[in-house]
Amino acid sequence: MAGRIDRWRWASLALAMLGALDSAYLTWVKVANATAFCSNVGDCDAVNASVYSELFGIPIALFGVGAYLAIAALLALEDRGPTLREWGPLAVFGLALTGTLYSAYLTYVELFVIYAVCPYCVASAVLITGILILAVVRLARRGPVMAVD
């Protein structure tokens, strides 16, 4: 079972790195005021120009970069000590759950408020949801974190 959990951890790490790249690209597009390469699929510029693309003046995509890199760091360092080994998977689950819920909100905003969809945002939503699914599987496979007396 340990080999299988390790594969899920590395799969999660790969998804997190892809998510960081996706979010970094969207951050660059926002900061540089560039036109996103959407290849006539969706309307990245409408989404990126909306009031929903920033929080406190900071591009939402930059928060995504931070979240994906935090998840990647937790996954990469998970076997480096007992605390990370024990609590790292739960922290990854918490970050992925938060990211998935926020992505669901942003997807709703794209579909029903802005009436435009950004394929890069959809990719990020799929990646963070994949990380969440893998985190749930990893937690279910390993059992309880600590016994309750």
Image (cartoon, grey):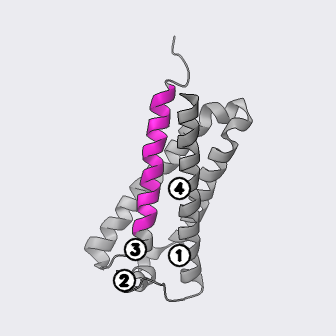
The residues bearing labels 1 and 3 have C-alpha atoms spaced at a distance of 11 Å
Q: Secondary structure at mark 3?
A: helix
Say the numbered circle drawn on residue 43: 2
**x and y percent of residue 129 in the render?**
42, 53
Read off the residue under disc 4. 15
Vertical side of 112 occupied by 41: above or below: below
Task: Characterize the local packing of mark 2: few (<14), some (14-19) or many (20 or more) Cα atoms within 10 angstroms.
Answer: some
**x and y percent of residue 144 in the render?**
50, 23
Task: Characterize the local packing of mark 1: few (<14), some (14-19) or many (20 or more) Cα atoms within 10 angstroms.
Answer: many
Question: Is residue 128 on the magenta stretch?
Answer: yes
What residue is at 47 percent from the left and 84 percent from the top? Answer: 37
Q: Are marks 2 and 4 in contact (CB under 8 Å)?
A: no
Type of residue at label 4? Leu
**Which badge, 2 or 1, is on the more N-terminal residue?**
1
Residue 89 in view of the camera: yes
Type of residue at label 1? Leu
**x and y percent of residue 99 in the render?**
47, 55
Read off the residue under disc 3. 119
The residues bearing labels 4 and 1 have C-alpha atoms spaced at a distance of 17 Å
Name the front one of labels 2 and 4: 4
Q: Secondary structure at mark 1?
A: helix
